[in-house]
Image: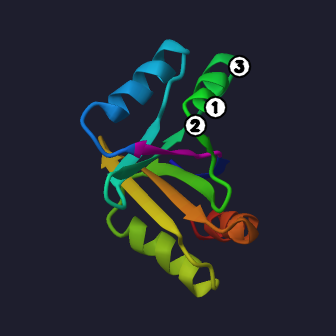
Amino acid sequence: MAYRVEKVEVWLGYLKDQPGELAGVLEVLNTAGSSLEFLFGRGTAAGQAVCFLAPLKGGPPLRAAKKLGLAKSGQTRSLRITGPDKRGIGVKITRALGEAGINIRGFSAMGMGGKAMFYVALSPKDLNKAQKVLQRTL
């Protein structure tokens, strides 16, 4: 199984850092018909949290996201890498980008059942170069 390196649109939102806040956002998106494959959330400054999610497609989910105050990430672009979960694959990805002079702004990885998925956040100027580097490397 080869690795796929795809551009993806990640959305972000700032929430109150309090119980049930993220659940409320997810309920609205679910009701609108959204089916997420990626969600990352964490607290930031006192009283605030941030969530990143993807994908958001179609009219109702996009309208719901905008109503919730979610937006496309303006300062970063993302690549999704999927393929076999092999020992050292994270090292291979991060090393290839580093050697190409590409700074990683965010990195999420998960592996399960022999498969792996990575989300790599990059500056907009590095997106195409990073995709090409990873397609050659993997």
Disc on the earlier residue, 1 or 3: 3
Magenta stretch: dominant secondary structure = strand
Q: Is 116 left or right of 5, judged from the image as shown?
A: left
Disc 2: which residue: 69
Return the mark for residue 59: 3
Q: How would you rate the neighbour count of disc 2 (Cα within 10 Å): few for under 14, some for 14-19, many for 20 or more? A: few
Whether residue 3 is visible to the viewer of this picture, yes or no, is no
Q: How would you rate the neighbour count of disc 1 (Cα within 10 Å): few for under 14, some for 14-19, many for 20 or more? A: few
Quarter of the image for the C terminus: give it.
bottom right
Q: How is the image coloured?
A: rainbow
- How many marks on residues? 3
Disc 1: which residue: 66
Query: Where is residue 17 shown, x and y percent of the image?
Result: 31, 46
Which residue is drawn at the image coordinates 68% and 63% (left, top)? Answer: 131
Whether residue 114 is visible to the viewer of this picture, yes or no, is yes
Which residue is drawn at the image coordinates 42% and 43% (left, top)? Answer: 15
Q: How would you rate the neighbour count of disc 3 (Cα within 10 Å): few for under 14, some for 14-19, many for 20 or more? A: few
Q: Secondary structure at mark 3?
A: helix
Three-letter amino acid code at the position of disc 2: Gly
Q: Is residue 129 above or below residue 71?
A: below
Callout 2–callout 1 Cβ contact below 8 Å: yes
Return the mark for residue 27: none
Q: Nearer the viewer, mark 1 or mark 3?
A: 1
Mark 2–mark 3 distance (CA, rounded to whole Å)? 16 Å
Disc on the earlier residue, 2 or 3: 3
Observer-nearest residue: 95 or 114?
95
Q: What segment carries the magenta color?
A: 9-15
